[in-house]
Image (spheres, rainbow, N blue to C red):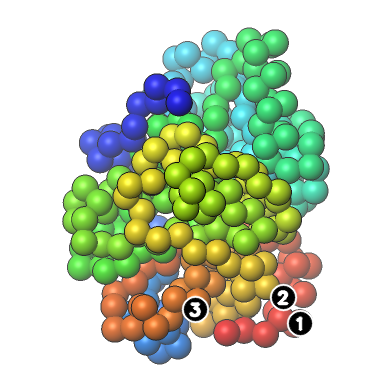
């Protein structure tokens, strides 16, 4: 494995100071209805209310702030299915740095337009994230761009870890936190924060059963690749990545799989219960909570609503055609 610097709690506190100049803390929202449905004290961390409507903007701001002198001399390039792209594009617009994004074909038009509105160039390549990532790495090598890996960069992990620090500082008595796993930075941030500050807090990760690479890697003890068949683009990764794998393999308490149908039902349930809009990957933690309902009974639980970038026609279809939980 590569010699990555592992994210630290001190790094998360450093990121908190950086991010405070650009982003406000997001609400930790108590839902009476979801609490009643799940038989626990249920809170949603509303990262869909970020300016990019997703949690990853925290990592983008932290990365660009720390790397701005180096990045300002070069074009910054990364690969993403949307939310990481918006985080880097947003941070590029804040710090005046040119950004190029490589995206797989088929990502929601909503995300493409948002990235372009932030001034970044969009390049399409491949069918899913990992094909786009490999192409971005090749471009960075040939064109001497600054490449940002969406999962193997500790500054990103420490930036997104600030959402968990906000949860802990507001509700230190929390028992369980459930966080989706796509690239793994959000769950890595969770373990870095909770397992350092209070190891009794259980951290549960969620993957799509149509992209279970991290789940299988965690179960088998070695980094594994899988096919990708999920329509939850935020979770559509074909492999586990080294840095989050190293952080999570000994710290995360459980990883569960949910189907696309489970996530669609969670999107509708969240909307009906709270009025909040979630994309499929953003609703994955709620889908997992319904799967784990009996294990959560009577506990204080936080679900990370990691993003709300969903096409309006997809949301309309889910609200009219998919049953809620």
Q: Are marks 1 and 2 in contact (CB under 8 Å)?
A: yes
Label 1 Cα neighbours within 10 Å, binned few <14 / some 14-19 / many ≥20: few
Secondary structure of the residue carrying tag 2 is: helix
Secondary structure of the residue carrying tag 3 is: helix
Identify the residue shown where x is 50% and y is 60%.
206
Residue 109 in sight here: yes
Residue highlighted by disc 3: 290
Find the distance from the CA under tag 3 to the CA under tag 1.
20 Å
Secondary structure of the residue carrying tag 1 is: helix
- Residue 197 pos. (x, y %): 19, 51
Find the distance from the CA under tag 1 to the CA under tag 2.
5 Å
- Residue 316 pos. (x, y %): 74, 74
In depth, the one of 282 and 69 nearer the eye is 282
Residue highlighted by disc 2: 318
Q: Is residue 309 left or right of residue 240?
A: right
Q: Earlier in the sequence, mark 3 or mark 1?
A: 3
Which numbered mark, 3 or 2, is in the foreground of this view?
A: 3
Up-down: is 276 above or below 127? below
Residue highlighted by disc 1: 321
Identify the residue shown where x is 58% and y is 48%.
213
Q: Earlier in the sequence, mark 3 or mark 2?
A: 3
- Residue 21 pos. (x, y %): 36, 39
Identify the residue shown where x is 38% and y is 46%.
248
Identify the residue shown where x is 25% and y is 58%.
168
For the N terminus, the quadrant is top left
Q: Quadrant of residue 116?
A: top right
């Amino acid at each position: 494995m590569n010699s990555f610097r592992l994210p630290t709690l001190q790094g998360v506190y450093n990121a908190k100071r950086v991010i405070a100049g650009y982003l406000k803390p997001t609400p930790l929202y108590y839902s009476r209805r979801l609490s009643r449905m799940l038989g626990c004290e249920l809170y949603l961390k509303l990262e869909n209310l970020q300016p990019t409507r997703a949690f990853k903007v925290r990592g983008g701001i932290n990365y660009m702030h720390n790397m701005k002198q180096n990045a300002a001399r070069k074009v910054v390039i990364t690969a993403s299915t949307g939310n990481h792209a918006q985080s880097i594009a947003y941070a590029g617009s804040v710090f005046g740095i040119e950004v190029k994004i490589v995206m797989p074909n088929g990502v929601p038009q909503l995300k493409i337009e948002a990235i372009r509105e932030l001034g970044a160039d969009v390049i399409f390549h491949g069918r899913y994230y990992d094909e786009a990532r490999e192409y971005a790495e090749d471009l960075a090598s040939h064109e001497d761009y600054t490449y940002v890996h969406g999962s193997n960069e500790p500054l990103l992990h420490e930036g997104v870890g600030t959402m968990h620090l906000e949860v802990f500082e507001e509700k230190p008595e929390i028992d369980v936190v459930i966080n989706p796993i796509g690239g793994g930075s959000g769950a890595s941030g969770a373990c870095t924060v909770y397992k350092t500050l209070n190891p009794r807090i259980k951290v549960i990760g969620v993957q799509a059963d149509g992209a279970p690479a991290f789940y299988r890697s965690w179960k088998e003890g070695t980094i594994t690749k899988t096919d990708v068949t999920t329509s939850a683009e935020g979770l559509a990764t074909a492999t586990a990545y080294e840095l989050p794998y190293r952080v999570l393999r000994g710290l995360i308490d459980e990883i569960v799989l949910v189907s696309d149908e489970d996530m669609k039902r969670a999107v509708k349930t969240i909307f009906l219960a709270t009025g909040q809009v979630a994309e499929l990957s953003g609703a994955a933690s709620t889908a997992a909570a319904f799967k784990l309902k009996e294990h959560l009974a009577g506990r204080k639980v936080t679900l990370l609503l990691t993003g709300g970038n969903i096409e309006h026609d997809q949301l309309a279809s889910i609200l009219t055609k998919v049953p809620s939980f």
